[in-house]
Amino acid sequence: MCGIAFIIIQIITALVNGTAELSRCLILCTWMAVFCVLRYVLHSISTSLSHHATFYVLSNTRIRLLDKLAALPLGAVLDRSSGAYKNIIVEHVDSIETTLAHLLPEMTANIAGALAVLAVLFLEDWRMGFSMLIVIPLGILCFMSMLRGYSEKFQRTVTSTKALNDTAVEYISGIEVIKAFGQSKTSYAKVVFAAKEGADCFIDWMRGSLFGQVAGMAIFPSTLLGILPVGCLLYMHRTLSAETFLAVICAFFRRYAAADHCPFLY
């Protein structure tokens, strides 16, 4: 919210109307600087707290998993490979970190800021508020195209990752026997094949999703595609004042600069 700084709208309105005073503008600029510094301070505090909480959750989750593993019957433990346990305890638990440490605090802040900008646009002129929403359906369609074949692609990555973990653990655990019987090349070839298969499944998945992601990230932030033509049309018909039009554009750019790499929230 501090990064939006709607104060600049007041300065633009005063300049366009010819009512701007130097002392008043200096005071407003000072407040903008304070909000800018405060935004980074609060963001640092939020990031620090979220990471402390996240690593506590990850540590506690791994401890509980190991306690559960120790309580299982030996036969049930031996039914799974050590690579599978490593994949669950290390990779699967570690995948939670991004959601807890970044997505929750940053997404919350950006959603609040985006809603505030949208509210201001509707207060300034409801027609300009709706013009900002024109690109949303197009962006959603682009991102939805990334979900084609999701189940099959996800299952392939899980299978290949498990196979890579099993092969690597088997190779490292039996390295003495492998060298003793001269099977280094054969065993190493299995590791190379598993690693290549694991990389290929992720590369194929990302390549298939590239167009939808790029198109979505290009369209979602481009709300000016609706704001500029609609605003110009309304201004030409003299149903929208110049100061309101400039204030709307200014609010858009302030939000664009403040958003933290999240195109949906521009």
Image (cartoon, rainbow, N blue to C red):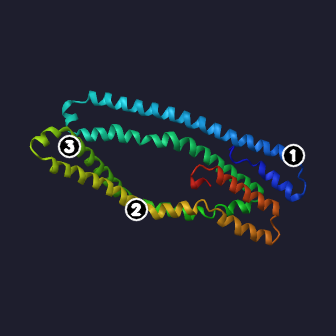
- State which tag comes first along the sequence, 1 or 2: 1
Q: Position of residue 146 (x, y in %)?
A: 44, 60
Residue at mark 1: 24
Q: Residues within 10 Å of mark 2 (few under 14, many from 20)?
A: few
Taking the image as shown, residue 15 lies to the left or right of residue 55, namely right
Query: At 39% from the left edge and 39% from the top edge, which residue is drawn?
Result: 93
Number of marks in the image? 3
Q: Amino acid at mark 2?
A: Arg
> Compared to 151, does 1 lie above or below?
above
Image quarter of residue 181? top left
Query: At 68% from the left edge and 61% from the top edge, which residue is drawn?
Result: 130
Alpha carbon distance from label 1 to label 2: 54 Å
* Image quarter (top left, top right, bottom left or bottom right) of the N terminus: top right
User: Which of the pair 250/187 is nearer the observer?
Assistant: 187
Mark seen at residue 207: 2
SS of the residue at dot 2? helix
Q: Position of residue 143 (x, y in %)?
A: 49, 60
Query: At 68% from the left edge and 46% from the top edge, which residue is drawn?
Result: 3
SS of the residue at dot 1? helix
Query: At 12% from the left edge and 39% from the top edge, which residue is drawn?
Result: 177
Circles 1 and 2: CB distance less than 8 Å?
Answer: no
> Compared to 150, does 26 lie above or below?
above
Residue farthest toward the left in the current orientation of the protein: 181
SS of the residue at dot 3? helix
Q: Amino acid at mark 1?
A: Arg
